[in-house]
């Protein structure tokens, strides 16, 4: 993206491991990996045998966790107007605030001159989304919301995980014509 | 000129006599908020956003209407002034629609910026806002939204003072006032897009840019307009290698804050008829191949070759071309108009505001570097066997019977006929500098990537190396330095 924040220092975002002789010969690292896997296997095995929590992971997407919070941020929905169109005015606030940069919007002229602006393209790349909910907070017209459910956010390849406008509008239709925020363009 | 010294917020400032307080402060790092004042328009003092306190003056004064005088003591940041600014913003915002999500100005709107900086208060207005016309089509380029307008009259003064078409005026009073055209008129003004830049809010917007992209995503590159020999300073705003809009950049000596509509469209419209790649006898060959062939041509037939220069070439490319011409002993050097004005086109032929009759950006540069170059119409064909034609628009019948090497960004009859064809780049796709009609050398930077992985400069460097000559420089900076 061409948008840059000027004046930010170059930062190391990771704790990089120093390259030493011991890390360069990979046998030691392979052995370490095998050790970690084995350790977790026996630990989880023990939990499972003693009927404790956390022994086995959830088999998503066939199962979902029963103890999910009702406030969980799950999949996105685009709110509809009563005529089935999206409430979104393609203002790009969500795309701008999104830390994963996974929202792609293209605007076009709406036929309704009191709305003026509507999205032509509205894609969310769910494989990049970090479910932070910033997009929901940023939206000035309450056009995007998140459901608690995380059912079926899967795909066999990463292109199948880019959800377009029609999917987002229709997979769990929410119709809302109220003026939620002071001004409803 | 006489100088006067005055004090702003305890800081002594010396400026020439007659300077306005608002300008004197801005030059010295104190920004006074404003809506109606524009540096290149006559001040009108109607928005009252720029009020300052002047000692011994019972009432606050608009700093855009007050000239500095000796010993004046001005305050710009007293609690009283900041209260006034808040009150002015509240007035402006009473009937403002808060369209920011759908407003093309959002992100560079003076009302947004100044509200965030100088007010930040919550609205106390519970009544219904005045509704006005939201889609007023001024012309097929400009759209006006009366609700967003704060009637600062910048656009009106622009048509009065700069473009001199007097098309716009303000009708009615108070909260019902709006900018309007005469009944049945359209806003056809060759500089009409300028009002979208100077409008401090999103009331006047360009239809071409409408809803295309949010302004904060655009990458801005400083460039020089290649539309005519005036060489207006512009900013090319791009995203993902596509030009979204072009806006004028301030330059007191050349274009103040303006540019013509034609050039803006000229940049935004996708260029048709582009050349691409390198061809010999209409077959695609590699770039190295063509360079090799041109080098051997120059070596063997340099004295049978004529060189037709392009007025779209940058000064740096011309310097390398001169080196090439000198070392290969090319005989005839000619120039041509690369773009001509067509009768009946929407473009202005020339006026006394900005547009010049010479529609190429760098003819002055050619005249400086090649004082002996003659016009192509004076060429005698029988003297030559080969023609190196640079740039589009050479008269093809003038080149009958010659073997043509064409280096051009545009496809035309010459590049179709050429035996050796090399695709070039446009001004927006390369670094360089142009010399404008007044002899001012203006550097510019590349805004677009360009299709080919070479540009004219690299092409000339390659040829010079093939000829066994050390080029004066391999990059724009090196050539520029060598020319100094
Ligand atoms: S939840 Fe966060 S990461 Fe996901 S689309 Fe919204 S803003 Fe982007
Ligand atoms: S913030 Fe809301 S209205 Fe704006 S583009 Fe995103 S979903 Fe649409
Ligand atoms: S003019 Fe400015 S404040 Fe008004 S709607 Fe447009 S961006 Fe918002
Ligand atoms: S349209 Fe813009 S420039 Fe013209 S008066 Fe209104 S706010 Fe000022
Ligand atoms: S800027 Fe001074 S009154 Fe408007």
Image (cartoon, coloured by chain):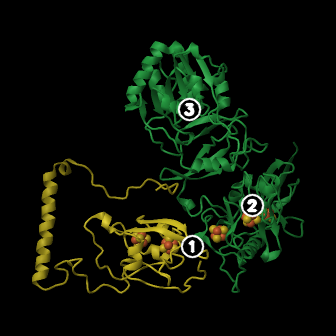
Chain A rendering hue: yellow
Q: Is residue B150 above or below residue B284?
A: below
Q: Position of residue B309 (x, y in %)?
A: 59, 26
User: Depth-wise, is mark 2 or mark 3 nearer the camera?
Assistant: 2
State the mark number for residue A111: 1
Q: Is residue B474 visible?
A: no
Is disc 2 in the same subunit as disc 1?
Answer: no
Q: Position of residue B174 (x, y in %)?
A: 81, 75
Along the polypeptide, which appears first: circle 2 or circle 3? 2
Determine which quarter of the picture holds residue B440.
top right
Chain B rendering hue: green
Q: Is residue B98 visible?
A: yes
Residue position marked by numbered label 3 in the rendering: B391
Quadrant of ligand 1 in image: bottom left
- CB of mark 1 near ligand 2 (< 8 Å): no
Determine which quarter of the picture holds residue B165.
bottom right
At 54% from the left and 38% from the top, the residue drawn is B431
Left or right: residue A100 compared with residue B238:
left
CB under 8 Å between callouts 2 and 1? no
Residue position marked by numbered label 2 in the rendering: B186
Is disc 2 in the same subunit as disc 3?
Answer: yes
CB under 8 Å between callouts 2 and 3? no
Determine which quarter of the picture holds residue B68.
bottom right
Q: Where the C terminus of chain B falls, by quadrant?
A: top right
Q: Mark 3 — on which chain does it sit?
A: B
Q: Position of residue B232 (x, y in %)?
A: 68, 43
């Amino acid at each position: 993206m061409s948008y840059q924040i000027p004046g930010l220092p170059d930062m190391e975002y990771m704790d990089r491991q120093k390259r030493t002789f011991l890390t360069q010969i990979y046998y030691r690292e392979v052995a370490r990996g095998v050790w970690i896997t084995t350790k977790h296997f026996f630990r989880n095995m023990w939990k499972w045998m003693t009927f404790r929590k956390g022994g086995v992971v959830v088999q998503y997407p066939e199962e979902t966790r029963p103890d999910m919070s009702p406030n969980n941020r799950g999949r996105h929905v685009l709110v509809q107007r009563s005529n089935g169109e999206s409430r979104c005015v393609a203002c790009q606030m969500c795309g701008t605030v999104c830390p994963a940069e996974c929202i792609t919007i293209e605007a076009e002229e709406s036929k309704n001159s009191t709305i003026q602006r509507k999205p032509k393209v509205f894609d969310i790349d769910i494989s990049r989304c970090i479910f932070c909910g910033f997009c929901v907070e940023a939206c000035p017209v309450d056009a995007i919301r998140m459901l608690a459910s995380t059912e079926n956010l899967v795909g066999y390849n990463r292109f199948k995980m880019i959800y377009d406008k029609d999917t987002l509008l229709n997979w769990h239709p929410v119709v809302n014509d109220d003026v939620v925020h002071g001004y409803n363009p | 000129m006489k100088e006067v010294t005055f004090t702003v917020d305890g800081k002594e400032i010396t400026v020439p006599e007659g300077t306005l307080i608002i300008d004197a402060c801005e030059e010295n790092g104190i920004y006074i908020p404003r809506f109606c004042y524009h540096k290149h328009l006559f001040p009108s003092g109607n928005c009252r956003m720029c009020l300052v306190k002047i000692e011994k003056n019972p009432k606050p004064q608009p700093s855009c209407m007050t000239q500095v005088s000796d010993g004046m003591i001005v305050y710009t940041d007293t609690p009283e002034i900041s209260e006034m600014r808040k009150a002015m913003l509240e007035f402006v915002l009473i009937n403002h629609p808060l369209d920011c999500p759908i407003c093309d100005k959002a992100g560079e709107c003076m009302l947004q910026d100044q509200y965030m900086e100088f007010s930040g208060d919550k609205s106390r207005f519970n009544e219904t806002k005045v509704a006005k016309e939201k889609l007023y089509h001024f012309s097929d380029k400009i759209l006006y939204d009366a609700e967003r307008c704060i009637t600062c009259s910048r656009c009106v003064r622009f048509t009065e003072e700069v473009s001199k078409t007097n098309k716009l005026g303000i009708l009615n009073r108070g909260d019902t006032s709006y900018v309007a055209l005469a009944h049945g008129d359209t806003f056809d003004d060759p500089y009409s897009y300028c009002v979208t830049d100077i409008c401090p809010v999103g009331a006047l917007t360009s239809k071409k840019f409408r809803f295309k992209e949010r302004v904060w995503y655009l990458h801005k590159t400083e460039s020089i307009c290649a539309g005519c020999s005036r060489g207006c300073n512009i900013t090319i705003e791009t995203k993902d290698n596509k030009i979204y809009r072009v806006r004028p950049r301030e330059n007191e000596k050349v274009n103040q804050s303006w540019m013509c509509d034609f050039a803006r469209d000229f940049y935004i419209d996708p260029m048709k008829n582009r050349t691409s790649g390198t061809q010999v006898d209409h077959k695609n060959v590699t770039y190295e191949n063509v360079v090799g062939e041109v080098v051997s041509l120059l070596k063997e037939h340099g004295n049978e070759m004529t060189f037709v220069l392009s007025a779209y070439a940058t000064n740096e490319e011309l310097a390398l071309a001169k080196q090439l011409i000198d070392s290969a002993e090319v005989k005839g050097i000619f120039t041509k108009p690369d773009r001509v004005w067509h009768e009946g086109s929407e473009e202005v032929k020339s006026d006394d505001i900005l547009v010049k009759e010479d529609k190429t950006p760098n003819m002055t540069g050619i005249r400086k570097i090649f004082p002996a170059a003659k016009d192509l119409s004076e060429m005698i064909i029988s003297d030559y066997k080969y023609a190196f034609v640079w740039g589009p628009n050479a008269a093809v019948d003038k080149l009958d019977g010659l073997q043509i090497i064409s280096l051009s960004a545009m496809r035309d009859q010459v590049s179709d006929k050429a035996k050796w064809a090399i695709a070039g780049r446009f001004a927006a796709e390369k670094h360089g500098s142009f010399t404008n009609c007044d002899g001012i050398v203006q550097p510019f930077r590349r805004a677009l990537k360009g299709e080919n992985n070479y540009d004219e400069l690299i092409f000339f460097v390659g040829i010079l190396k093939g000829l066994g000559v050390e080029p004066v420089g391999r990059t724009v900076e090196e050539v520029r330095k060598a020319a100094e």
